[in-house]
Image (spheres, rainbow, N blue to C red):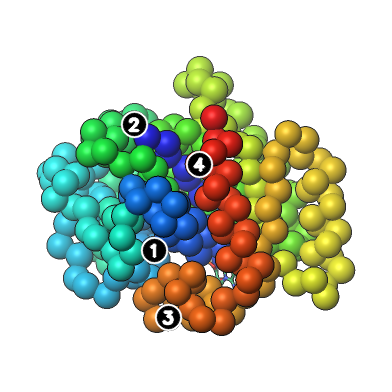
Amino acid sequence: MKTIALSLQKGGVGKTSLAVSIAAELASLTGSVLLIDADPQASATSWIGTHTITVELADVLTGTTPVKQAIMQTGITGLDLLPSAGLGGELKAFGEGPGKDDPFCFRRLLKEVAARGYQYTVIDLSPGWGALERAAALGADEIITPVLGDSFAIDGLQIFNENLVTLRHRFETEKPRHTRIIVNAVDGRIKQHAETLDAIRAAAAGITIYSVPVDPAFRLAQRKHCFVQEIATVKPETRLVLHTIAEDLHTRGK
Ligand SMILES: Nc1ncnc2c1ncn2[C@@H]1O[C@H](COP(=O)(O)OP(=O)(O)O)[C@@H](O)[C@H]1O
Ligand SMILES: [Mg+2]
């Protein structure tokens, strides 16, 4: 099983939108994907489902509930969800409480997930870099960083990179790898977006850079509790780049 986390220490860059959409795309490619909502705000869960959550990720991490009991099906064949409930704040409480002394809680969880036969796990994270996010990163094989085309992009990537280097050093591990950056919500009419893309391409040797266009279909999909791929008006470029990312993860993800 391969685990991919979407992470950057900044909100509103598209972590949730891309985690949900990449998970759906990988599911149609492989038929065997689990999306883990590890953001205490639970936006991926409220995007995908409208049902009440009775057991959530926090219950699995604390050991109260077996992972099998918390996993839900989604509207896409081959895509399941390990949800968070948001409201009760249990995931946040776990991260600030018992999770603080448990950097390998996600590694253990992911072992159980792998034993259930999933080929891919996609983790949506909050913009924080607390114990919870670090544990999720430690469990992941790779992290994809979404940035916007604004002036914060380079700084944001630098902060992320410093965090990642510190984590790897502390735990003497090579993982997670960071080999893909998504420049999200790119508007061809905005000069700064093109300049940011160029600057990232120039600075990030050995990293694959994807450009996702600004596309109202993301917001629409979130509102309709469906996937962007199911929105009739989704831009062909959006469809194409999501497919390319999933294909690359599947075939060039060694
Ligand atoms: N490519 C895009 N084009 C237009 N809007 C987008 C795009 N990606 C995300 N959005 C919108 O931007 C907002 C923030 O995205 P979200 O995925 O919640 O970011 P994050 O998880 O990083 O906080 C949401 O309203 C979402 O619908
Ligand atoms: Mg989010």
Element at label 1: helix
Residue 246 screen position, x and y as percent: 53, 50
Element at label 3: helix
Question: Which image quadrant for residue 152?
Answer: bottom right
- Tag 4 near tag 3, CB within 8 Å: no
The verdict on label 3 being within 8 Å of ligand 1 is no
Q: Amino acid at mark 2?
A: Arg
Q: Residue at x 83, y 62 (%)?
A: 194
Residue 140 screen position, x and y as percent: 44, 36
In the image: residue 138, left or right of residue 114: right
The verdict on label 4 being within 8 Å of ligand 1 is no
Q: Which residue is mark 3?
A: 223
Q: Residue at x 47, y 42 (%)?
A: 4
Q: Which residue is mark 2?
A: 107
Q: Which residue is mark 4?
A: 250
Between 5 and 80, the residue placed more toward the observer is 80
Mark 4 Cα within 10 Å, few/some/many (few <14, many 20+)?
some
Q: Which residue is mark 1?
A: 44
